[in-house]
Amino acid sequence: MNVLVGDLETSDSNVNSLSVLEVSFCLYDDRFREIGIPFHESARIRSTCVPSLGACLTNGIKPDKLRGANNSSFDLVCKLYNRLQEWKEFCTIGQNFIQFDHEVLVRLFQRSLLPDIWYLKKLPRRMMDTLFLARASKLIDDKSLKCEVSAKGSHLFKLTSLTKMNGIPHENKHSSAGDVQATAMLAKMIKERVPKLWDSGLKIAHKSEAKKFIEKNKIVSHVAYFYGRARWYANKFLFYNNFDYARCWDLKTSPEDYLKLGYQELKKELKKTPKVIRTVKPSKFDICLDYSYAFNAEPYSKIGETELRRRSSILDANPKFVELIKTIDNDEIEEKQSIDQSELIPEFRLYKDGFASKKDEDNMKLFHKMEWKDRIKLFDRWNNQKYSWFNKVLLFEERPELLPKSVYKEVQSEFSKRLHTIEDVQWQTFPKFANELVNYGERFEKEKNEKGLKLLEEYDLFVKEMEKKYPKP
Amino acid sequence: MKKGRVRRFDPGSKDAFTVSRTRIQNFLDCKRCFYLQNRIGIKALGSLPFRLNSATDTLLKKTFDAARKKQEPHRYFKRENINLVPFRHEKINEWRENFQGIKYHYKKANLMVQGAVDDILIDLKTKELSPVEFKSTQTKDGGSVKYLGKPHHKFWKNQLEVYGYLLEKNGFKISEVSYIVFCNADISEEEWNEKLNFDVQVINYKMDYKWLESTLDKIKELLIQDKIPDYSDPDHCDLCRYLLKHNEIKNI
């Protein structure tokens, strides 16, 4: 299967509100030889989005790029979508791609009213992540990758660190094109050094296949990563909860003592740490391999395979117990959902609203066939008002002159409110930017970093210009 | 030879055992099925012959022969500015013939590797050869075939690499680039006038046949073992999946 390596550079780290500034995707064959022409494009920052100074300084994105790139955000996403369709069948891979880049792309597709926002995840396409593979690779074979060790003694799996330690050429660090090349070489290294992990990874690189793997194997070796360390879990699959996550029993603990507990007692026990119920997310490339890896690792190796299998068979023999865990689990999910009553802004409602209706999907297709001047006619035709809002915002960002005055004011006033707020919101605001500016200014002054201070002035000028468009409410 | 039985490996024989490029692919696909066919001698399930595909192959071969005679690039290659001409060699017909093909005795494993190529091109300046494979089908994804990203494209790549390997081992200088002439039937016509038109693309593929000799060694290892391999992953091999399900039903 061909491998599509991708990376994004963004204006901020909040996937719901950031602006994508650079996108690179490069297609490789199964031996990591480049095929066709790579996709490298940059875009101006959206006019409704305040940049995060931290992100811009890390990625080396200067103010002239924020305002001067050839593409708008919408142009960029349409170009990318067309190219992905041309490449057709591939397994996407990137460094921390699943938790960040893909989540960004899905939201970008949604905001751009593209109907198929899950395109990269839909069969025959699959998705893997070098971050998860690198952690698992280190766990399976310590010699497979060299890692820096942090002050706390944890292995570091940042791309720049992995490339430095493993002799992978990494030019233009933090540019999407440079990171794509380096990620491809890292993936190739993992594939060659731990081929079993790579092959197993491909088997779980799609949700449906990962579920099949878990169901078929019943006991799986799961790689969990927390407190800076990857570790094995011998997980016995029990059921899928309402999020479609696999809930599993950690065979480190025998289920015998839990069998006779009632609802409340069991609920209390299941909350205790270390947790006996573990979660495997089939849709998130949660690395699972066959049972042998965990069985041969401590503490499972000390318990022994016979005992571990006995514990597993106890669970098989007690379906009512498993059913009770499922009830407790799903009740907790419902409780959490009912507590969360906060009204989310449309950009944050990706999961909340579920899939688009047929009518809205048809409208999206229509939107992309239309010319800009006709797109204002769709404002009132959406089932879900979220899409009507995106429709208006796209016009506001791309062709404000085409908007009726009332709609222009509606969008402008909403963004004025959002961008000037001093509340602790999840998106970047003018006050947050000002705060960052002060902090970086103090730091650069201390360091006598003249270049840095000059750059801050340019960013400040850029944001001040932007502020003019959004008068304080 | 009884019906339903096939040529099989005899561990006691000193003769080289012939493995065609199809059998090499069979080995890569499913070790158990390969063993059953090549060691035990159970013939694999057959399929209906692809006569229409064979017909396009035959017609393409004729047009390549015409270009060979003139020693000029075939028109599909000319169109792509690929300045290679069909290779003229006394054995070219034998190499293109099924059950004949190009052969090489891989002595380390005592296997006779064999593969019938569709055609071969030569760069008259560098004298490097490039194997060519003809593929014809009907697909709406014609535009993305050039990326060779579908699972079955792996078979095409392996096929070209076996030919590249065989040509190299027969003493020829090989280009790293091989070609697929991909013919995609056009079904967009509203009315059919009993003619099938094709959209033809020339797709290049960079070969790397480092994998082949280690695979041949593994084939030999498998052939000399006395134990039938376990069922393959049912997601991987249709026949194993079928037989496993069949056994489950039988046991009810």
Image: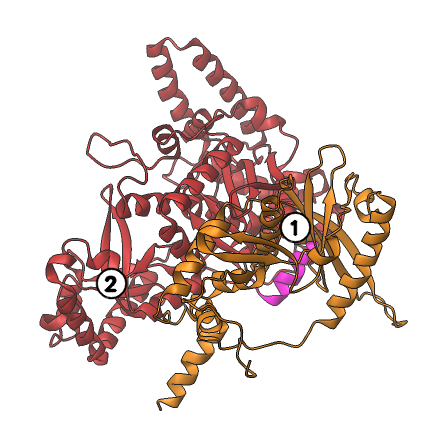
Chain colours: A red, B orange
Query: Which stretch did the figure color magenta?
Result: A356-368
Residue A69 pos. (x, y %): 62, 29
Magenta-colored stretch includes residue A365: yes
Residue at the outermost bottom position? B252
Specify whether residue A116 is in view: no
Residue positioned 17% across, 61% down in the render: A271
Q: Secondary structure at mark 1?
A: helix
Give the residue at x 60% y 35%.
Answer: A40
Mark 1 belongs to which amino acid? Glu
Q: Which residue: 46% across, 48% down? A: A103
Q: Please tell me how crowded label 2 is: few (under 14), some (14-19), or many (20+) other residues with Cα within 10 Å.
A: many
Q: Is residue A389 visible?
A: yes
Q: State whether residue A86 is above or below residue A418.
A: below
Return the x and y of residue A74 as percentages of the image width and height: 63, 42
Q: What chain does mark 2 sit on?
A: A
Q: Quadrant of residue B145?
A: bottom right
What residue sits right under mark 1 in the picture? A86
Judged from the image, the secondary structure of the residue bearing numbered disc 2 is strand
Q: Amino acid at mark 2?
A: Asn
- Residue furthest toward the right? B193
Q: Would residue B243 appear left or right of A115 to someone viewing this image?
A: left
Answer with mark 1 or mark 2, whichever residue precedes in sequence.
1
- Residue A67 located left or right of residue B193: left
Q: CA distance from mark 1 to mark 2?
A: 40 Å
Magenta span includes A153: no
Foreground: A246 or A354? A246
Whether A255 is drawn above or below B160: the answer is below
Do the residues marked 1 and 2 share a common chain?
yes
> For residue A235, which numbered disc appears in the image?
2
